[in-house]
Each structure stands twice: as C-alpha cells, then as structure tokens.
Image (spheres, helix red, strand yellow):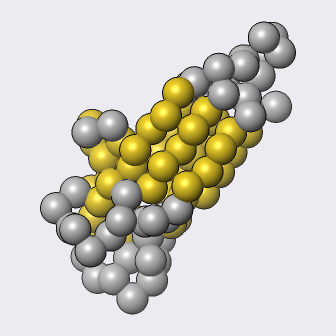
Amino acid sequence: MIDSVTLCPGASAYCATSPCAVKWAMPSGTKGSYKILVDRLRAGSAEGGAIVSLGSYWGGSHVFVVEGHDQFKPAYLSVSESNSNTGE
C-alpha cells in the first residue's frame, strides 16, 4: 500500500513508507494558474481551488513551492526510507 498526502502552502507531512503519492491543494479564492516546484523542479500546475496530483516521491525531504509567489509559504514533505513493497 502506498502512503498518500495532500499538501497546500505552509503545510508539512510525513509518509511512513516510500514511495509517497502527493496531491497539492491550491487555496480557493486565488485566480489563475500556478506552477508548483518540488526541490526546484517543476512538478505541475494548479488553478486556484483545485487539487492536483504531483506524482510519487521516495525517501528523504522534499520542499514544495508556488513559483514566483512569495505570499504562499513552502510546504514540506518527509518520506521514510522504508519501501512499501518490501517492508525494508
């Protein structure tokens, strides 16, 4: 079973197994399309009020930011090094 989390600006989450499926919730009331970066690489985009899938992430720490919009605080994800398929 794969852990999954939903992040939004300013949130933090922990996944006990690797990989971890991540969804991103863009705050409602925001207009336009926003680029979401993970560890400085583009992971996807989201409209205001939308929830989008950003894929799966493996062991370690990951930082999610809304590119070019300092009013949105970064979100943080920590993923355990244990593998969900082997239990290692």
Quarter of the figure that contains the N terminus:
top right
User: In screen coordinates, is 36 left or right of 6?
Assistant: left
Q: Position of residue 9 (x, y in %)?
A: 43, 65
Q: Position of residue 30 (x, y in %)?
A: 33, 83
30 is higher (above) or lower (below) than 38: below
Residue projecting furthest to the bottom: 29
Can you see residue 49? yes
Q: Quadrant of residue 75?
A: bottom left
Can you see residue 53? no
27 is higher (above) or lower (below) than 77: below
Query: Residue 62 or 29: which is nearer the viewer?
Result: 62
Q: Position of residue 26 (x, y in %)?
A: 44, 70
Quarter of the figure that contains the C terminus:
top right
Q: Residue at x 45, y 83 (%)?
A: 28
Query: Residue 68 or 54: which is nearer the viewer?
Result: 68
Query: Residue 85 or 77: which is nearer the viewer?
Result: 77
